[in-house]
Each structure stands twice: as C-alpha cells, then as structure tokens.
Amino acid sequence: MEATQIEFWYWWVLATGFLAIELLAPGFFFLWLAVSGFVVGSLVWMQPAVSFEIQLLIFSVLAVASVLVWRRYFHAKDQQSDQPLLNKRGAQYIGRTFNLVTAIENGQGKIKVDDTTWKVQGPDCPLGSKVKVLNVKGVVFEVERCGEATEPGK
Amino acid sequence: MGGFSLFVTVLFAFAILMVFMSVKSVPQGMEYTVERFGKYINTLTPGLNIIVPIIDRIGRRLNMMEQVLDVPSQEVITKDNAMVRVDGVVFYQIMDAAKAAYEVNYLDVAIINLVMTNIRTVMGSMDLDELLSRRDEINARLLAVVDDATTPWGIKVTRIEIKDIAPPKDLVDSMARQMKAEREKRAQILEAEGLRQAEILKAEGLKQSAILEAEGRKEAAFREAEARERMAEAEAKATMMVSEAIAKGDVQAINFFVAQKYIESLKAVAAADNSKLILMPLEASSVIGALGGIGELAKEALNKKG
C-alpha cells in the first residue's frame, strides 16, 4: 500500500470540495467532513510523516467528533431566530386575554380568538369571563381567570 | 498491514455514513418525529438537529403550516327534502406533531370525511331557505363539531367554509319564479295603494267643496233673512211715521200720496203701446176723490195764507 505520498494539499482540496458540495446540496452533511478535512490537512502539514491509514483514521474519528462537539457546545446557541414563534400558532397567544364563549365546566371551556374558537383548560368560570392564556398544551390553552364576566362572546 | 488498511477504509466509509445518519436539518415550517427502535421519543424542530445514529430514525415529516383541504362536492338532502350539491374548504394546522403523526392514520382523509359527514348532519337539520341564508351559522356549527372531534389528533381546525350551495335546476327556476311573483305582488300592492290614496283624496276634495258650498248657501240665507227683516222694519217705521204724520195733521194728507200714485199709474197705462183697450180696474171716483182731497189741501193752504 506504498502509494504516492499524500500531501496536505490533497486534504485541503478535498475539504474545499466538501464545502462546495455543501453549498450546492442541502442538509449540512458535508460541513463536518470539510472541517475534518481541513484539520487533517493541517496535521499532515505539521507532521508529513504520518501514514495514509492513520490520516484516514483521524479523519473518520474527527468527522464524528465534530458533530458531537457541535451538539454539545453550539446547539442551543445556534437556534436563534428573529421570529421564534413562527409555526407555533398557540404560543403566539400566550399572555393575551380573551372572553369565554363557553363557560369553563369541569375544567373545559372555549374562548373566541380572532375568527375561530379554541379549547381552554382552567378553573371553572361563567360565560363571558375574561381569561388569560398561560400556556399551550397541544391544541388546548391553559388559562387563569383575570376578570369578571362582561358581554359574552367578545 | 493490509488488514489495517481495509479496516481504516471501512471505518472511513462508516464515519461518513454516521455523519449522514446523525445530522438532520429540519426546514422552517416542518417538524420531524424521531423513533428509537421504532418507538416515538421526540420531535425535531426547525434548524440543525443531531440524532443518535443506528438506533434513532426519522419517523414522519410533518408540515406545521396552516393547510387547506378541498371538501369534495356532495349531495345533501335538506330538512324539506331538497337535494343540493355542496362543497367547501377546511383550513387546519398541526399543533402537535407527535399526535398528528401517530394518533390518526391518513390525517387528510380523516378530516375530509369528518367534515363531509358533518355537513350532511348540519344541513340535514335545516330548510333550504335557511341553508342559503345562514351560511355563517353553518360554518360555525361545523367548526365547533369538527374542531372538537379533531382535538385528539393534535390539529387545530381554524375554519370551515361552505363554498358553493347548488340546488337542482328546476328548484332554481321555481325560486326565480317565486322571487318574480313576490316582486310583482309588491308592485301591484303599491299600485293599488296609490289608486286608493288618489280616490280618497278626490273624495276629500269633493266633500270639502260640498261643505263649503252649503256653508255659502247657509250664509246667504241668513243674510237674506236679515235683509228682509230690515226691510220689514223699515216699512213698519215708514208706516209709523206716516201714521204719526197723519195723526198730527189732516187725514186728507194721505190722499195726496194716493192721488199721486193713481196719476202715475194712469200715465203708465195710457203710454202702453197696445192702447186700443184701456182697462180701468180702479174706480175713477177714487181718483176724483183724491183730486178732491188735493183741492181740500189747497183750500186749507190758501186759508192759512189768507
């Protein structure tokens, strides 16, 4: 297996190739391979004597390790968005106040939100009471009572 | 050494495969469920996610955006036995990816069937006229029922709209006829009202004019009577004055007047055109008598002078 000496350039070319594929193909698979390629290339540049098998081994371990490292340290930070409530319809209503259109009995009632009705869970209240949305559980709001009954259905 | 090389090569391929298996990027608007050994464990939210390769698999890919389903057209029998064709749309959004993935099989089919059967239920309890005029109420009732029914599936039905209600052609024709008749009836009633009003106004006018005329006549009669009264009064007064004058003076004085009248009458008779026959309905002696009276007066006057 005495092939031509693998130069560090080969790894960097491979890494750049992975990055180019990453740009074109969706899915973020090749990013980690590119990172590993650059690291291995840098190692070969410093230690040219390392055999090709070891280089491959290091590359393989690094590819998996980079994913794990990212998950441990950057996963939470990376999920920033200027629209954190996008596609979380229920969460958009947390903190807002609505009137009951169906009295809460046995912990179950309904409120009118915009042009539709939502189910709510909370303490028993008469029709028309003001309730505040605290939390969303699936398609049901958890509410607390925050006002006396006014005109129902508003 | 050959074995080691082979192992390293296989390891290299395996590492790449591991990366492929464990890195899952979820686009915005989607959520993926993760199954560990086939059992659901969690849901991947949009962004870059890492799953444990080999033991974890992506189960279902769910669209978390609000979606529209067409409710296919169907025949519905109303309460008053009219057959109508009805179609509609349903808007829904998955709120709980896990429930939508595993609580129900073929979510779209389930929703559409639920809506279709409920459309029959709601519309079957209404008359055709109500059906056509109270769509808001139909939509609200459908939404309430379907939303409750779909809650266990982790979806929120935001609205249900009935798109088209099409009664059969003969019914549409008779509805048009009914509307036309209704409008004609209104027109005829209005015309009749107009005529009636006009007649009433005319009669009122006639009545007013008759009353005014009668009032005029009454007024005239009153005035006439008054005039006659005044005249009689004047006559009486004149007679009184004459009598008084006679009482004061001579009886013969009256004869002067009488004689004057006689003479005037005679003159008129004589001046008549057909004077071949002269009627003398009065005694000539009276005239002569009167003249005598005048003679007496003359005498008296002369005596007074003398």
Image: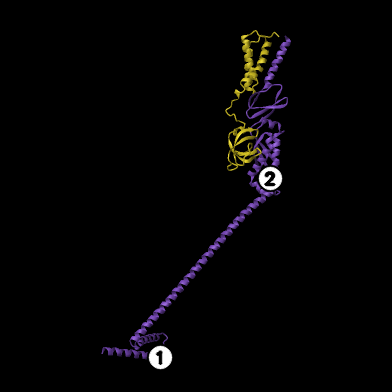
Chain colours: A yellow, B purple
Q: Are marks 1 and 2 in contact (CB under 8 Å)?
A: no
Kindly identify the amino acid type of the residue bearing the numbered disc 1. Answer: Glu
Under circle 1, the secondary element is loop
Residue position for label 2: B123
**Residue A89 visible in rendering:** no
Q: Mark 1 and mark 2: span between their CA atoms?
A: 120 Å
Q: Position of residue A145 (x, y in %)?
A: 60, 37
The structure residue drawn at horizontal position 60% and vertical position 55%, both measured from the top left corner, is: B186
Q: Is residue B54 left or right of residue B256?
A: right
| In the foreground, B197 or B97 | B97
Q: Position of residue B9 (x, y in %)?
A: 70, 14
The structure residue drawn at horizontal position 51% and vertical position 65%, both measured from the top left corner, is: B205
Q: Is residue B302 above or below residue A42?
A: below
The structure residue drawn at horizontal position 34% and vertical position 91%, both measured from the top left corner, is: B292
Quadrant containing the N terminus of chain B is top right
Q: Is residue A29 above or below residue B194?
A: above
